[in-house]
Amino acid sequence: MLIIMRLKAAAEISHFSFLIPHYKKLIFISIIFLFLYLLFEKFVLQYYIELSCNAEERTMFIDYAKIKIRAGNGGNGAVAFHREKYVASGGPDGGDGGKGGDVVFMADDHLSTLTDFRYQRSYKAENGTNGSGNRKTGRSGKDLVIKVPRGTVVKEAESGVVLADISGDGPYILAKGGKGGWGNQHFASSTRQTPRFARDGYPGEEWELILELKLLADVGLLGYPNVGKSTLISVVSEAKPVIADYHFTTLTPVLGVVRMDAENSFVMADIPGLIEGAGEGVGLGHRFLRHVERCRMLVHVVDVAGSEGRDPIDDFNIINEELKKFNPELAECPQIVAANKIDLATDAQLMRFRKFIEDQGLEYFEICAPINIGVKELINAVAAKLATLPPIKRYEAEPVPMEILESKKTSTGFKITRDGDTFYVEAEWLIRILNKTDMDDYESMQYFQRVLESSGIIAGLVEAGVKEGDTVVIYDLEFNYVP
């Protein structure tokens, strides 16, 4: 029996005996295929996953960003003396340092969001190069140009003051490059013919900024979700918003150009719906209301039929209350009320809501946006109203408070150098304040003097031996000392 079993086993083995010499190759090939699959999964699939995620992120509507910018530092002045055959004691000829590059903002109509600023938060312009002998001035640093969507408002982060409204076509310099330091050629005098020192370049301005995109639109559409705002803008313009029978189909503002004729048109903005409690973050909150702050007027769309069980009068009052919470000035913006979904409303509902709106002193129009009933009359009224209103709001640049500038100094140190009756004061933290000081404004000069006193610079000058009538030089500012 045992012999028979062994013979059967031997017969079975003989069927696969041709694989035995190649099993090592098969194992090696299997390992290679497994290794290649793991590489494919690790890099190729991961690349496409990240690519799809990035594409999704880039389609998000980003209208707020916080960044840091820094202009280039000025180059240092050179210490050099003229060397030429047959010319003895050629004198100092050290050149000045080059100016640092500015940080410049410009509007770009091809951009629609601030998405790029999610991936880069710090921006720095090029420094100026140092001066050299033979009175050669260093090369100026290249300006750094930052492109943003038109309508971006730039604010100083700590104080919140507006530095620029990037709505025009011109460049906006928001951080000035430092000036180049003087070479030793400037310090030669009758009593000092071989000055062996030069001045360092000035540091560039540095700011932490908040960027807020506020769309440039003439008319803003407001209302609860699913009242027909997207349908209305799709009917009167070429805009293609997402339209569906559920709340918050519009997650980002949508712009559409409404053309009245060959020469007249206006821009309408569909803002995502508001609901009660938006000020506390319910729904999409007040996030997108900044985009109607510039609008010249508002069209308040209301579901007059109350098709979702709400009272249209309550809807109207709640939306206006949310406007007041966000910005009281926005609540005073001219409004036209569009009562939508009249095909679902009863005569009693229409009469009740019409009387309520007319008692508020507002223009009232009944429409059915999907089938274009009453829409033409509404748009004509909007165009007529716009003709009587001022242009789109532009924000004026404001000066940064001196107190904020003083609080940003990283140190209180300073250096005083005396040269006969001239005293040179150096303090990097003082440059930012000096650049923003208006020499023709009495209050501004008074504040600058208080900074000199509180920082100990005046006391330091007295200790260094300054007398009445002596010259004091603080970078570009030169004055005679008066105790």
Image (cartoon, rainbow, N blue to C red):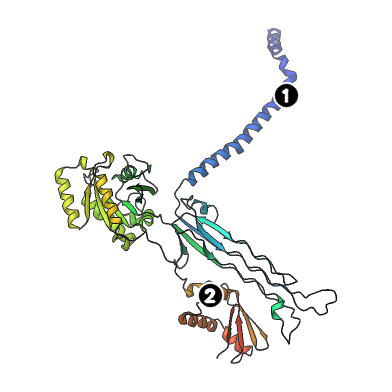
Gap in angstroms between the C-alphas marked 1 and 2: 77 Å
Q: Position of residue 210 (x, y in %)?
A: 47, 61
Q: Is residue 123 above or below residue 262?
A: below
Between residue 93 and residue 126, name the one nearer to us: 93
Where the N terminus falls, by quadrant? Answer: top right
Residue in the foreground of this view, choosing between 449 and 436: 436
Residue 130's image quarter?
bottom right
Amino acid type, label 2: Ile
The numbered mark, 1 or 2, whose residue comes first in the sequence reads: 1
For mark 1, does the 10 Å Cα neighbourhood hold few (<14), some (14 to 19), or many (20 or more) residues? few
Horizontal side of 237 relative to 368 (left or right) equals right
> Percent from the top left, x then y, of residue 95?
71, 72
Residue 25 is marked as 1
Q: Tell me the crowding category of disc 2: few under 14, some 14 to 19, or many 20 or more residues within 10 angstroms, Cα based.
A: many
Disc 2: which residue: 433
On residue 6, the disc is none
Q: Which residue is at the far right?
A: 86
- The percent position of residue 471, horizontal first and vertical second, equals 61, 87
The secondary structure type at the circle numbered 1 is helix
Front label number (1 vs 2): 2
**Residue 134 percent across, percent down from the top left:** 75, 71
Q: Is residue 320 above or below residue 303?
A: below
Amino acid identity at mark 1: Lys
Q: Are marks 1 and 2 in contact (CB under 8 Å)?
A: no
Quadrant position of residue 368: top left
The residue that appears at 16% across and 46% down in the rendered structure is 349
Locate the C terminus by quadrant: bottom right
Inspect this view and state whether residue 302 appears.
no
Name the residue nearer the viewer: 73 or 4.
Answer: 73
